[in-house]
Image (spheres, rainbow, N blue to C red):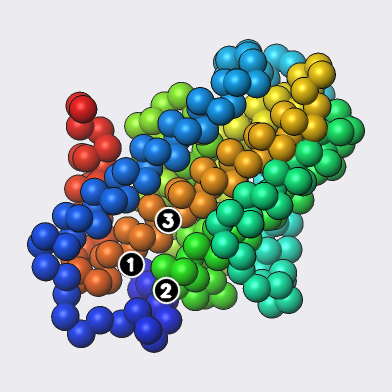
Amino acid sequence: MTETLTPDTALTKPLDAAAVEAELETLAKRYRAAGGLGIQILNLLGGSADSLLDKLPAPVRNGLDSATQQALLLAMQGANGSRRVVPDQPAGVNRAVSAAMGAAGGLGGLPGALVELPATTAFLLRSIQGVAAEEGFDPEAENVRFDCIRVFAAAGPLASDDGADLGFLTLRLGLTGGALQKMIAQIAPRLSVVLGQKLATQTVPVLGAVAGATTNFVYAGYYQEMARVHFGLRRLAVAADQPHEVLVQRLQDRLLAPR
């Protein structure tokens, strides 16, 4: 699939081997730091990732998959529209706004969190699109829009299987008429667990708005970093004139290697 880059990202000379290695190391550090920080902060809220979902009522747990699919579809529409009205913001501003949204949702307990969740999903997707633009990609291009959804395949900072998280680097689908729905259907079950954990942290007694704000702050940072890894790798493939799959494998080898 051809990547859609803005004109200023075109390079006349591929990066040399040393520069490619340096870029891969930077991306690997971003990936490791994003998950580690999220786990540490969310653990402060109390409760383990395995027990958080048990805090949700059964009807909520059972409807998470379908709710997540619907949230992603609506988020894509809302995020694309908002970029035409409001310019992209720095990462710190995005995290602050996301935290404020989580605090507002947390004030209302679970009902408030359920209302806030689709809005947060749209905001996270919007921030991912902003990262794509920073890396030189056109967020309006169809394949880039799909890649923004693919970043959600990285699940979240509470995901326990780090190896499975690497799947977001290689997940690809043909751009057929139903590709977006098919991709969301693949991603939604795993993401629904993560979003369910987010909902559960906002039902912890006493913490309320603090839990919502902290969780959103962590998630905004996490997905922005995952987006930088995803689109940074795609930009590197163009700049180094190397197959994307080769660079993916080299990055995965770094991430999975014992330290």
Q: Image quadrant for the N terminus?
A: bottom left
Where residue 20 is drawn, which disc sits there? none
Residue of label 3? 228
Q: Image quadrant for the C terminus?
A: top left
Q: Tell me: residue 44, above or below residue 234.
A: above
- Quadrant position of residue 198: top right
**Mark 2 element type:** loop
- Between the C-alphas of marks 1 and 3, the distance is 10 Å
The residue at the point 57 percent across, 62 percent down is 90
**Mark 3 element type:** helix
- Between the C-alphas of marks 2 and 1, the distance is 7 Å
Q: Amino acid at mark 1?
A: Arg
Give yes or no for contact between labels 2 and 1 (Cβ–Cβ under 8 Å): yes
Q: Earlier in the sequence, mark 1 or mark 3?
A: 3
Q: Amino acid at mark 2?
A: Gly
**Mark 1 element type:** helix
Q: Can residue 23 be seen at all in this image of the molecule?
A: yes
- Quadrant position of residue 123: bottom right
Residue of label 2? 136
Q: Tell me: residue 222, above or below residue 199.
A: below
Residue situated in front as seen by the camera: 3 or 116: 116
